[in-house]
Image (cartoon, rainbow, N blue to C red):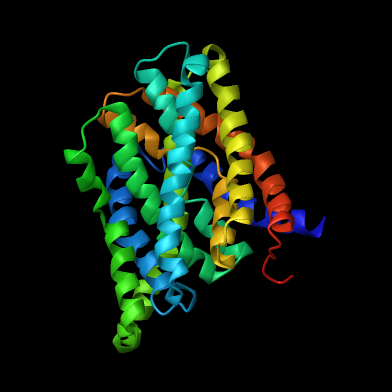
């Protein structure tokens, strides 16, 4: 019971801040005109600062297996998820066109940033967060390569999206961490980066909540019952089980097992909404899946985390 309460204490603040963002949009305190500028600041400044502060000087990232293996596991996790979604796409959507292709992508891409980062920090500590950022190098590569190929078949413009500020900040931080150059960074710079990084998650989650208010208005869930329930079964049932079993079977480090457990419990991400808009998919399908799995994950996240720490022989902070 104590473990369930610890998980809930880590999960509920994320959903509370999301709900605040939803309400801020409803009363127009956080309007649509502010979204683009705030998201640019979050993606190009705050998240890179957070990644840099967690990776540079981190002992766990000096282990070779925590540098090359997490991106490979991240890429594979997204690829297998998309494959499962591809197999189920026609049954779930009743067609094989853009809606079906969007379904496959939305099933494959879990929420790999805004929710897992604070959960990893509160449940497992800074080493898990550092490995999570390295893991996400692979998820980004899979999303902008396999995801775009499924939707559009064209990769030239997609690859430029991979080379963004969060991605490059992880690469830079890994180089600085491996070479020991972080020892020569002035303390005032380190503190400034850390302060900016601490703003990244609250701002991003508020924005996510505000955007969910907009997305909900676009969706008619009664006509998409099969899309929603199959996405819940696959994204919150089958795929978490596969990821956790794999983490137990393969020789992962403790930190990578922690990251895989957190990511396995996550709902579908919001990013497929953006990709589907850019490359001729169905943003409505991606929205329905993201919202249905996010709401239902309030129940499944604590259950998977409680099962996973026992199955993988892990411990939360303080245990």
Q: Quadrant of the N terminus?
A: bottom right
Residue 203 location in percent, x, y?
Answer: 42, 54
Question: At 52% across and 32% down in the image, what residue appears?
Answer: 291
Tell me if 154 is positioned left or right of 10 in this view. left
Question: At 44% across and 23% down in the image, what residue appears?
Answer: 285
Q: Nearer the viewer, residue 213 or 161?
A: 161
Residue 247 location in percent, x, y?
Answer: 59, 54
Position above or below: 140 against 192 = above
Question: At 25% across and 54% down in the image, what residue appears?
Answer: 164
Q: Nearer the viewer, residue 301 or 44?
A: 301
Q: Nearer the viewer, residue 277 or 180?
A: 180
Which quadrant would residue 300 be assigned to in this image? top right
Which quadrant would residue 198 be assigned to in this image? bottom left
Residue 273 location in percent, x, y?
Answer: 37, 32
Position above or below: 165 against 222 = below
Q: Nearer the viewer, residue 98 or 119?
A: 98
Question: At 40% across and 43% down in the image, what residue appears?
Answer: 30
Position above or below: 116 against 253 = above
Which quadrant would residue 183 be assigned to in this image? bottom left
Q: Quadrant of the C terminus?
A: bottom right
């Amino acid at each position: 019971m104590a473990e369930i309460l610890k998980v809930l204490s880590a999960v509920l603040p994320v959903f509370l801040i999301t709900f605040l963002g939803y309400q801020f949009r409803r009363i127009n305190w956080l309007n649509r005109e502010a979204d683009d500028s705030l998201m640019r600041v979050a993606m190009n400044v705050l998240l890179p600062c957070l990644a840099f502060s967690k990776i540079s000087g981190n002992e766990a990232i000096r282990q070779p297996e925590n540098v090359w293996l997490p991106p490979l596991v991240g890429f594979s996790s997204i690829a297998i998820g998309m494959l499962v979604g591809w197999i189920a796409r026609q049954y779930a959507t009743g067609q094989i066109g853009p809606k079906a292709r969007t379904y496959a992508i939305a099933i494959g891409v879990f929420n790999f940033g805004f929710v897992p980062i604070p959960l990893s920090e509160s449940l497992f500590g800074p080493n898990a967060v550092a490995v999570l950022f390295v893991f996400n190098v692979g998820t980004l590569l899979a999303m902008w390569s396999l995801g775009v190929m499924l939707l559009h078949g064209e990769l030239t413009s997609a690859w430029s999206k991979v080379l963004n500020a969060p991605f490059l900040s992880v690469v830079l931080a890994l180089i600085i961490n491996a070479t020991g150059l972080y020892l020569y960074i002035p303390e005032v710079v380190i503190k400034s980066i850390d302060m900016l990084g601490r703003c990244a998650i609250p701002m991003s989650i508020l924005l996510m909540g505000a955007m969910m208010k907009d997305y909900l208005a676009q969706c008619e869930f009664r006509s998409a019952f099969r899309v929603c329930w199959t996405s819940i079964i696959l994204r919150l049932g089958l795929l978490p089980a596969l990821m956790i079993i794999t983490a137990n079977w393969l020789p992962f480090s403790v930190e990578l097992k922690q990251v895989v457990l957190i990511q396995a419990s996550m709902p579908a991400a919001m990013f497929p909404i953006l990709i589907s808009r850019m490359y001729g998919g169905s943003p409505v399908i991606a929205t329905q899946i993201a919202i249905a799995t996010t709401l239902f994950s309030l129940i499944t996240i604590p259950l998977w985390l409680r099962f996973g720490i026992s199955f993988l022989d892990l411990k939360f902070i303080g245990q």
